Amino acid sequence: MSLYATDWPKLWKDGRYFAQLPSPTAPKRQTPCDGTLVGEVVAVAIDLLGSTYELGTVTLPFEPEEHFEILPTLSEQSSFWWGRAGRALASQLATAKYPIRAQASHLIFWWARLGGLMGVTSKQARTGEQYDTSSFDGSNLEFSWVIPHDTHPSEECNRKIRFAIDPFHPERGHRVAGGAVIDYLWSEQGGMGLVKREEGSKDWKDIIEKWLFPDLKDTGEIVEGTTYAIAFDLDPSGDIELKQYYMPPNPPLPGTEPKNCVAAYRGTDDLECFKGLARDLHPSLEAPLQMIIDFVQSNGKESMMKWVMVACDVTKSEKNRLKLYIISERTKLKDMIYDMTLGGQIAGPRVDESMANLSKFFTRLFPRAKTEEPQFQPRSSIPGEDGSSNLRRNDVRMMYYYELFVGQSVPFSKIYFFMDHFSKNEYDTAQGTELFFKDVGKPGDEGWMTEALAHAYPQIPLDKRNSIHTVASFGTKPSGWDVTNYYSPEFFAPEFDE
């Protein structure tokens, strides 16, 4: 048995970390509301929590800029994580102009279900292999904005807000198995009536897990050295769609025996083993997968491409996609376009338009780039940081994913720029993104993105360092292209304690 075995039923029933609620129903408007903002929030809280918890009171008349507490404190630890993550999430939902009821339900879900998965409140108290957290400061949560290029920032639902967590045990400080977490959050009790629960929507997650770890006896068993991530797409309707990610261990050192059987180790360039997985998920994935295999083994060799992670949505097969994350050594723009199009195999007017816009995005993100190649910018040190938990970006120059949609004959690609390593500071990245959107005709007042970012992450001036932006990405889709920026809440930034 693993050193990191978890008693899952006991954990889910621990009221210090997870709100203990009555059997949920879909959170439709049931509680009478007086039509005010506070009234809407209180009504949603009662709909979701029932009479289990006593809610705080609000003094009226309430001013929007005031701070008020409605939700109770589950424990000191849960309060710590709620304080570090809740405000940032609330700000992002508000500036994206989600409906008030959706804002409230997404925030209550985070409070009730995710504080207990953030782990201990000190990164020094974590155990196991911990260098793979999604940010330099060790935060195991990452927010992201999917930003449309045709909506005004003042419009309702002007961008999609999402986040991903790297789950940890709240007491022992080790990683926990993502499969068991998904099973709980997908369940009627764990999902609180908010998580989409279509029949068969966990099938791909189960197939991938059993393929990747064939000797795994139970989805709650952790494979040591594996990084798990769970993503949450927050819909303006209030619904939540889950995604599952697996980054398997590095291969064992020569002369040592692996602790678990692993179908594909992190860092492999041999993708032949994925053929069986693609066939088991859906036969239509086999042809686009073969295009990726052929490229990596031939013309893509100069990019020294290596696979590191696999993911899927928690949705029905006909709507799902298999995502393969691959790192690369080459950082020139022409090489990025070559790799994204698999050496020109993926072509056509849609692709041409997407690559033209990628070039514009690149130019705005890296205005100081020489020979069309972004220059690595040394990260400004966070005061008090010893760097012991920093993500090792020096070994990872670029990352792509290739997503295989059911029924599509070619893969669709996305490129990730690690802005917490490439950029000068947060302001440069936000301004560059905003200027790009202006170039492609997105409406909006000057400064809309920097203002929204500063409101969500007020702990530091945006021109101080480059640690909130983790990634800026550009992806191709069947419908065109999109831009997504990713952000660390900087859980352990010293400014929180000042």
Image: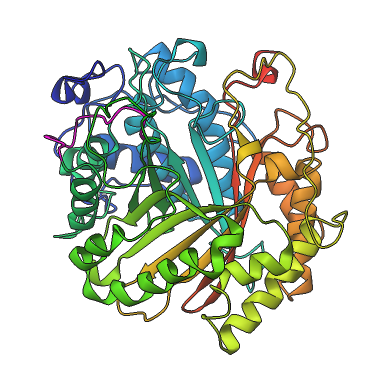
Which quadrant of the figure has residue 424?
top right
Farthest bottom residue in view: 349
Q: Quadrant of the C terminus?
A: top right
Q: x and y percent of residue 316 in the render?
A: 22, 64
Could you tell me which residue is drawn at 55 percent across and 61 percent down?
A: 301
Q: Which residues are magenta?
A: 215-226
Residue at 56% x, 88% y: name it: 348
Q: Nearer the viewer, residue 385 or 426?
A: 385
Does the image show residue 110? yes
Q: Quadrant location of residue 179?
A: top left
Q: Establish if 11 lies above or below 41.
A: above
Residue 274 vs residue 383, the one in the foreground: 274
State the image coordinates of residue 478 (x, y, percent, origin top left).
Answer: 46, 78
For this orientation, the residue located farthest to the front is 255
Q: Is residue 125 above or below residue 97?
A: above
Residue at x 54%, y 71% (from the top left corner)? 476
Instruction: Work out whether 42 lies above or below 263.
Output: above
Classify the position of the N terminus by image quarter.
top left
